[in-house]
Image (cartoon, rainbow, N blue to C red):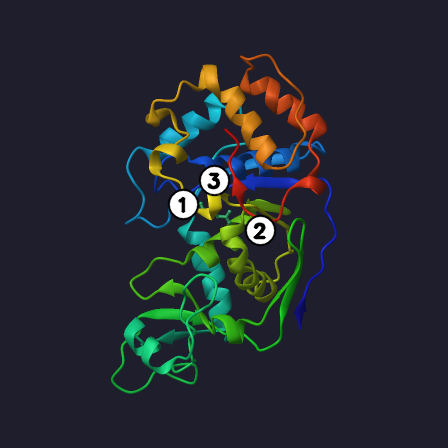
Amino acid sequence: MTVSFTSRQIPVIGRFAPSPTGPLHLGSLVAALGSYLLARRSGGRWLLRMDDLDTPRVLPGMADDILRTLEALGFQWDGEVVWQSSRTDAYQAAFAELIDKGMVYPCGCSRQEIARIGSAPHSKDGELLYPGSCRNGLPQGKTPRAWRVKVTDEPVCFQDGIMGACCETLAESCGDFVVRRADGPFAYQLAVVVDDAAAGVNQVARGADLLSSTPRQLRLQRLLGYPIPDYWHLPLVTGPGGTKLSKRENAVSLAAGRDLAKTGGSLLLAALRFLGQATPTFPAIVTPREVLAWGVSNFDPAVIPRNSVPFPE
Ligand code: GLU
């Protein structure tokens, strides 16, 4: 049974883990700010990790742009930035442990084959439900394409700080899921739990687009004997009526030509209001540091909205 209703853990070790596949945008700004304030409000640590594992999607120069943008917005992280691209040995060790435990197996199915045999697509993130075709051995003539971890039909539950009680039965939502591609790279789901555990992260605050990944990560944490962090899934930034923001509306980064020394404070204030916070009236020009300091002393997690709302002007 993989039921976990966690209590809030102290001292908090939180983190922000951007993927350098593009510049910082409003959604990642909200994730940075939310994770920062949830950690710092109780005097906790806030770590920074660059999720640069998905090399085909990583864009040159973006990691640096994200770091400089965060600095310009007044964020200070604890310790060195961790780069997923330098953590392969740790992922390999966790993967070897899953092999030893008999919990992963090679799978030779292509996406088209899974679509043909599988039933409904994964309802939340478009992933296909894997029907377990290779669970009992690779069929003759098939070559491994990926390694999958076994799931069960017991619900995986957790208590999200914002979304409340969440439960998912992995056998029904995604089936045995990929932890490594046969050509080498480890999947995000494995890397994230290995990194969070290694860094002692006990509070994961991130965008609600990752809510559907959490049960898979809980499954891996249980199998690998890792502690379970507290989860906070922050509302997603959308335009009016839930529409997707254009690139220009969404851009936060220095690369997008923002003068964050002048406008960073008001941008952070807007992000605080987006997170439901009743901010006082600040002078027209307020520094990012002043806004962050107010947030650390006054941030109220109880008023963070569950649903996506438009980003304030
Ligand atoms: N790197 C992931 C992203 O930018 C976030 C990982 C996480 O917070 O768990 O979507």
Neighbour class for label 2 at 10 Å: few (<14), some, many (≥20)?
some
Closer mark to the observer between disc 1 and disc 2: 1
Q: Dot 1 corresponds to which residue?
A: 244
Q: Residues within 10 Å of mark 1 (few under 14, many from 20)?
A: few
Q: How far apart are the two marked residues, 1 and 2, measured between alpha carbons? A: 33 Å
Q: Nearer the viewer, mark 3 or mark 1?
A: 1
Residue 4 in the image: x percent, y percent?
69, 62
Which residue is located at x 50 percent, y 23 percent?
73
Estimate the x, y position of residue 183 in percent, counting from the top left: 29, 63
Can you tell which quarter of the image residue 286 is in? Answer: top right
Q: Is residue 78 visible?
A: no
Identify the residue position indicated by label 2 in the image.
197
Three-letter code for the amino acid on which mark 1 is drawn: Lys
Which mark, residue 259?
A: none
Dot 2 falls on a residue whose secondary structure is helix
Residue drawn at (71%, 36%) of the image: 300
Q: Indicate which disc residue 27 carries.
A: 3
Amino acid type assigned to the residue bearing label 2 in the image: Ala
Question: Residue 233's spot in the image, x, y percent?
Answer: 58, 49
Is 248 left, or right, of 72 in this rendering?
A: left
Sort mark 3 into few (<14), some (14-19) or many (20+) by Cα contacts within 10 Å.
Answer: many
